[in-house]
Amino acid sequence: MGSEAIAIALSSALVGAAAGGLGALLMALISWGSQLGWGHAVTAGFPTTAPMAIRLTLPLLAGLAIGWLRRRGAAPLPELHTTLEELHEQGAVKIQPRGSHLLLGLLALLGGGSLGPEALLSRALAEWSLGLSRWRWLKAMPWKAACAISGGLGLFGLPLIGGVALAERPERPLPSGIWRWLPGLTSGIAGFAVFQGFSRFGVGEQGVPYTWPADGQQLLVHLLWALVLGAVGGGLGLLFISWRRWSTTLLSRWQQGPMAKAMLGASVLSAMAVLMPLTLFSGEQQITPLLRGELEISGLTMVVIGLFKLLVCGLCLSCGWIGGLFFPLIFSAAAIAQGLALCWPDVIPAQVAVSTMASAIQSAVLGQALLPLLITAGVLKGHAMAGVMLGSVMGLGVRQITLAAKTA
């Protein structure tokens, strides 16, 4: 048993490290393409400085290409949770390498879609690892696709993400047994190490360590606001779910083809690129300047941007612009929380507000508590962990209470 565990850990680390390197290349390609089309300001986390014609044209061209590929029968890029479900239920049987997945995912991201890269990254790594299975030295390695995904997710900031993402499910929130955790955990650590993640963690997203409350009264205030804003974040998560479901149903009733849907999403993105450019892209790069106050926008404007970010992300997914939703959700919650703190600076503690709402919105959407906690900790680099933990629990609680009330 011990030798088997060591063999699994070593092979998982090998696959995870290789996946981390491949993920780095893919992320570099996305960054290069975004900078080429939208300008250097976007990759630095600021609104695009591209000419007006480029802002209007790029989403429309990407939408045209997405619609054309879908009309010709290209399978849509599966979301991250779909890829994980396929690994849970059928192992690697259902995952087949398709070049259209990579192309559609790149078009959605480079076209300005309000989407994260994790869906494209996870699917690409899973398919690439299975494509390499014909190599003799890889055939004996277990969990190849799962370990590749874990190694890729590890680069986003926390090695535990890989293990939990493959083991935790809504109906099984806290998996038991080392065999469910070991491959993903080991490969996640390897992918994390490739990006020198250990040197970045703990500093805090705003560049300074989180300052704990100085006395009992301040601690109580932070606790109360974490509970309140955790419930608000949970409500935002349910709003996102309802909006995505409603928009998908409405488009289905209109009986529009993939081209019309893709161009609808492109038209909205073109308008947002002019009116509210911070609603575009994943939000991963924008979080840091947002929280540091470098964007120089008012608190009310931040709240509006956060709400529109949710709407645009949900519409992109409904229109066939498929990508990840973790980063858009986190950015949206961070913008709303930071905006509320700016509107009432002497009342709402900004650090607690951001971390609490960022984890709560994910818990409400995913129906899980542990994975959102780890993702938020990774993205915010360990900032205000107390708020992250409370928000994760509150978001899940809001979801469960709401679902129970609907079924009663």
Image (tube, helix red, strand yellow):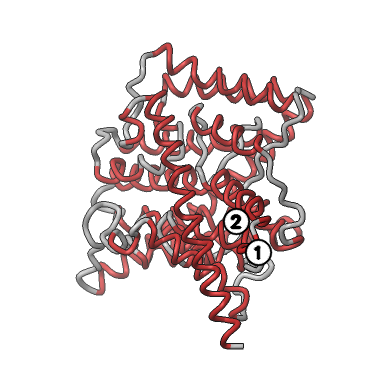
Label 2 to label 1: alpha-carbon separation: 7 Å
Q: Classify 332 as above or below 383.
A: above
For label 2, the SS is helix
For label 1, the SS is loop
Judge the density around disc 2: few (<14), some (14-19), many (≥20) Cα neighbours within 10 Å: some
Q: Which amino acid, mark 1? A: Pro
Residue 181 location (% of width, % of height): 57, 73
Q: Is residue 286 visible?
A: yes
Quadrant where the N terminus lies? bottom right
Q: Which amino acid, mark 2? A: Leu
Toward which corner of the image does residue 136 lie, by quadrant?
bottom right
Measuring 32% from the left and 69% from the top, which residue is drawn there?
220
Measuring 31% from the left and 45% from the top, which residue is drawn there?
288
Quadrant where the C terminus lies? bottom right
**Residue underneath mark 1:** 170
**Residue underneath mark 2:** 366
